Amino acid sequence: MKHKLIKLLGSALALVTGLAFAGYADDRAEIENLSNKYMVAVDAGDIETVMATWADDGVLEWVGGVEKGKDAIRKAMSNFGGSRYEAIAKDATSRPRTQHQIINHVIDVKGDTATSTAYWFAMTNRTPQGDVQLLYMGHYADELVKKNGKWVFKTRKVYNESRDNKKLWYPELGEIDPRTKKPPQ
């Protein structure tokens, strides 16, 4: 009898642990997918999908400044990426474009909050010769919240190594100060 009880308790513990890990894995997958949806929507000019990724009181820190709340973020993002007006000839069969990619997600989930860092880069064929070139690169530092069962961005800091909002080094990415070779404090 004692052996069966121990076996039953062990099975119950394994089930609960498995469910906890599955929940964590689901959260990570949803957060990564949220970042991917955001990037694709920015390039497509789909402002409604972009806005669906944000908390009402979200904060976007980027090369354009600091946007607080969905109204400010919408205004800023409505003239960015694929949302910009572009005159295209009626007989055009293709057009130059820019595409953003996001990679190397590091995601930490704690209940209904999470942090994420990820590298990003943008490629374009909007060149005189029409070839593909790297345009920009940087990383995101995100804070996320789960609202009504759905992950959204609370804060998104966009660092762009080709623009004014770059730093010498990023302790949040685990980088060591190149001047002192000492780990982040």
Image (spheres, rainbow, N blue to C red):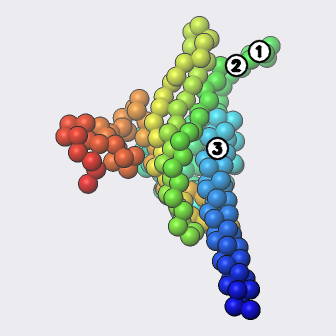
Image coordinates of residue 140 in percent, x first then y, are 48, 45
Please say if the residues under marks 2 and 1 sit with CB atoms less than 8 Å apart: yes
CA neighbours of label 3 inside 10 A, class few (<14), some (14 to 19), many (20+)? some
Please say if the residues under marks 2 and 3 sit with CB atoms less than 8 Å apart: no
Please tell me whether mark 1 sits on a helix, a strand or a loop: loop
Please tell me whether mark 3 sits on a helix, a strand or a loop: helix
The residue lying at 67 percent from left, 78 percent from top is 10
Residue 92's disc number: 1
Q: Given this view, does label 3 or label 1 mark the residue nearer the observer?
A: 3
The residue lying at 36 percent from left, 37 percent from top is 166
> Could you tell whether 147 is left or right of 167 in the image?
right
Residue closer to the observer: 69 or 130: 130
The residue lying at 57 percent from left, 14 percent from top is 127
CA neighbours of label 2 inside 10 A, class few (<14), some (14 to 19), many (20+)? few
Residue 36's disc number: 3
How many angstroms separate mark 2 from mark 3 (CA)?
23 Å
Q: Is residue 170 above or below residue 3?
A: above
